[in-house]
Amino acid sequence: MAILRFRIYLEEDESVYRDVVIRHTQSFFELHEAILKAYEFDNKHKATFYRSNDHWLRGREISVEKYDKEYKAPPLIMSETTIASEIKAPNQRFVYHYDFNKNWSFLIELINVSKEENPKTIYPSTIRTEGIAPSQYGTKGLLGEKFADIEEKYDLSAVGDGFAEKDEDGEDLGLGEESAEAGEAGEGEEV
């Protein structure tokens, strides 16, 4: 059984990509779910693949379902279409379009074909991750949801001006009157 390795680039930034391995007999719907999982997106929106060429031009469409739009040729349905049936070249390319309102586009390239299946891998599977995935619905910080826990634990919202009036033992530092007295005593003495 052939194992296909696809590199899935974020169209806006080719330094952000995921490598996904999948059996050639699996469907485009399974690849669709693997891409969403690899980029931590939900599965609530419309999606479609396009067979592509070396210049990333969109060809035959492979959709989750037939949508209410005009087609030059009726789309193939993801759940009914195996990946092997659409591989026409050794470096086959596809364009994946997700969430037609947000217009997430991914460039998919076949980068390896192997005959050896790893018995420990559940296919499809993400085997390499490069770059920070974008947030599907807005901004995502480096800490993500964990920052709220850190902020709450250390109360980062109540930050003082950084100066203390007492030392670590709780003793008054006496920066007020004693310093003024020492300055006056030093003025009248001769050296």
Image (cartoon, grey):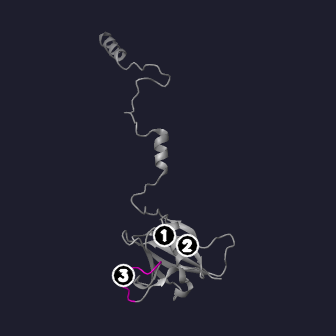
Count neighbours of disc 3 (C-alpha within 10 A) and say few if under 14, some if 14 to 19, many if 20 or more.
few
Verify CB contact (< 8 Å) between mark 1 and mark 2.
no
Q: CA distance from mark 1 to mark 3?
A: 30 Å
According to the picture, the residue beneath numbered tag 2 turns out to be 20
Foreground pick, 182 / 163: 163
Q: Residue at x 35, y 18 (%)?
A: 176
In this picture, is 53 found above or below 181? below
According to the picture, the residue beneath numbered tag 1 turns out to be 17
> In the rendered structure, which amino acid carries the disc numbered 3?
Lys
Q: Residue at x 30, y 10 (%)?
A: 188
Principal secondary structure, stretch drawn in magenta:
loop
> In the rendered structure, which amino acid carries the disc numbered 2?
Val
In this picture, is 165 found above or below 100? above
Measuring from the top left, give residue 166's x and y in whole percent: 43, 23
Foreground pick, 185 / 10: 10
Marks 3, 2: nearer the viewer:
3
> On the rendered image, what quadrant is the N terminus found in?
bottom right
1 or 3: tag closer to the N-terminus: 1
Q: Secondary structure at mark 1?
A: strand
Q: CA distance from mark 3 to mark 2?
A: 30 Å
Outermost residue on the right side: it is 119
Count neighbours of disc 1 (C-alpha within 10 A) and say few if under 14, some if 14 to 19, many if 20 or more.
many
According to the picture, the residue beneath numbered tag 3 turns out to be 69
> On the rendered image, what quadrant is the C terminus found in?
top left
Q: Secondary structure at mark 3?
A: loop
- Res 54 quadrant in image: bottom left
Marks 1, 3: nearer the viewer:
3
Measuring from the top left, give residue 103's x and y in whole percent: 38, 71
Write down the region rendered in magenta. 64-72
Marks 1, 2: nearer the viewer:
2
